[in-house]
Image (cartoon, rainbow, N blue to C red):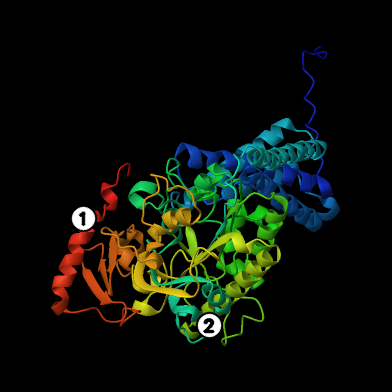
Amino acid sequence: MNEPGGLSPAPAPPVPAEPLTGLALAALGFSVGACFGFVELVLLGIERFGLNRVIMRSREVVWMTPLGYAVGFGILGLLLASVTGRRGLRPKVAVGIFVFLACASLLLLYVGRLHPIAHFALAGGIAVQAVRLTERKGTSLARGSRRWAVGLAVLIAAVVMVSLGGRWIRERRALASLAPARPGAPNVLLIILDTVRSLDLSLYGYERPTSPAISRLATTGVTFDEAVSVAPWTVLSHATIFTGQLLDVHHADWFSRLDPTVPTLAAIFRRQGYRTGGFSANETHAGWEFGFARDFIHFEDHDISLPEVLDATTLGKFTSDHVRTRRLLDFWDLVGRTNADDINEKTLNWLDRSGDRPFFLFLNYFDAHTPRMPPEPFAGQFGASRPKASLRSRVRGFVFPAPKPHKSKNAYDASIAYIDDRVGQLLDSLRQKGLLDNTLVIVTSDHGELLGEHGLEGHANSLYFPNLHVPLVLSMPGTIPANRRIEVPVTLRDLAATILDLSGVHVSPGVPGVTLTRYWHDIPYARPTPILSEITGLPNLGKKVPVGRGDMVSLVRDSLHYIRNGDGVEELYNIRRDPTESAALGAEFNNELAGMRRVVDSVYVPRHKQAGH
């Protein structure tokens, strides 16, 4: 009603929202973090399922990402509360800080696609709009933030229960629904020593005692002196070991997954009534993300821990991998790394609780891969090692530039010695449980490593023989002859067919290759599998690195190794006389080179001609 004189009363000034202090700030941070965590989850889902891109995350991303942001921003809220004390922060200031940081964190998903100015301008614009919304509401956020925090915590807990509980239920059902296994069916233990080359194993004549346990195993079975991987890096090699197929069929590559229609060893053994388990320490390239968990009843790659939860967020991963963070914390290992002891513990626990059926077990030991951090007493076994290194972003991942050559070599050999010791411990435990007598044990590697040869460090950079020459030992008492060595070159492409043959499983038409048992049964084969290796080019690495010049292919035949680089340049080496390939063969071997070129042309499918790519 109007006052006398026709004047309306002046509107009451807005009541300022009460400052946020203590737990209210932490609750607001938790709420904003959880909300933006779910937003990041949606964006990752679009990348993963809508655009079919590799996201390099754990299967637990559905709850780890929102929980990681919630915990991280909740801790930030506590820090702000400790700084501001009883004065607290005005709600719009707190909202502006949290929303700006959350948006800036989300936009890290698009680093390289957004200019830094656009990155922060967009984050700032969203934060301003959030502040305006807070001002229009004009109410206290203290009680509201607490309610939101409780509600979001309950939601995250529910997602955790559905994710982990659902997986447990599916495993129970899968075990219960297995067909009866064949009486006397052997167990199968497939051990892959990630990044371990034959040149550095005492089993193959190396002067340092790096592999006494594997050497003992070799006395009970067959050792292949020249086993050749199909690729110098993890995804391609594991895909072929699991399927017997090459890239033109399995399609697993830098940013593409194992074709779900291609039969795997795990699927075949599962149909035979086997309990199938996989434990991979190479969580990125030999785990769920690239399709390797698909046919296992139980599969573990990422651990469930607070560091893994925080690293499941884009902000956490960016922060933990940043060189300044590493220097501040003096931490140079991988976040949440699974070492050989962890793999053994998980394996034995699973065997104890998964029943008494025959098992197919896949283990990936990752300790020989950079960054190499062997534990004591192995760290100093061969001299100074464990060098610090910086991190650099490369191909959606991080590489560790090479330290001084002698330290790199020492750390590599010490890491192999550590893995070897733990493999020995695992085999001893299986023997004590009475499981080893009826178990086919396969010890091999996915690829080797370059330690300065050809001026290169690491792998996935070329097809030189140290990158491809891997150990291969097969042991099965009563089935495989003891203490036998095979000197002729063989390919890991034949490994899947060999495992099925030795297990008494009918070799599926979908698993090509020729069983390696022919070498100790002296059975001649008119058409042996070509010992072919390949890698898809990565032009962004630059032409100084061989793989940066385009797709590469190589062929081993007898003592010769032929390499065709992406730029068409051909190289030929004698791997018996020159295992590190320090000097290419000259023009007098042109006839041999031309012959190997013809073989490659007849069997190799170039990457750009592969169906569906």
In the picture, the quarter occupied by the C terminus is top left
Between 38 and 91, the one nearer to me in the picture: 38
Counting other residues with Cα less than 10 Å from the Cα at mark 2, is it few (<14), some (14-19), or many (20 or more)? many
Relative vertical location of residue 140 with respect to residue 335 in this rendering, above or below: above
Task: Give the farthest residue toward the right.
Answer: 86
Apparent side of residue 572 relative to residue 312 in the rendered image (left or right): left
Q: Viewer-nearest of labels 1 and 2? A: 1
Query: How many circles with numbers are drawn on the protein?
Result: 2
Counting other residues with Cα less than 10 Å from the Cα at mark 1, is it few (<14), some (14-19), or many (20 or more)? few
Residue at the (50%, 72%) spot, across then down: 482
Secondary structure under badge 2?
Answer: helix
Q: Which residue is mark 1?
A: 602
In the picture, the quarter occupied by the N terminus is top right
Residue 566's quadrant in the figure?
bottom left
Residue 552's quadrant in the figure?
bottom left
Question: Does residue 337 show up?
Answer: no
Q: Which residue is mark 2?
A: 410
**What type is the residue that disc 1 sits on?**
Ser
| Image x and y of residue 590, in percent | 14, 73
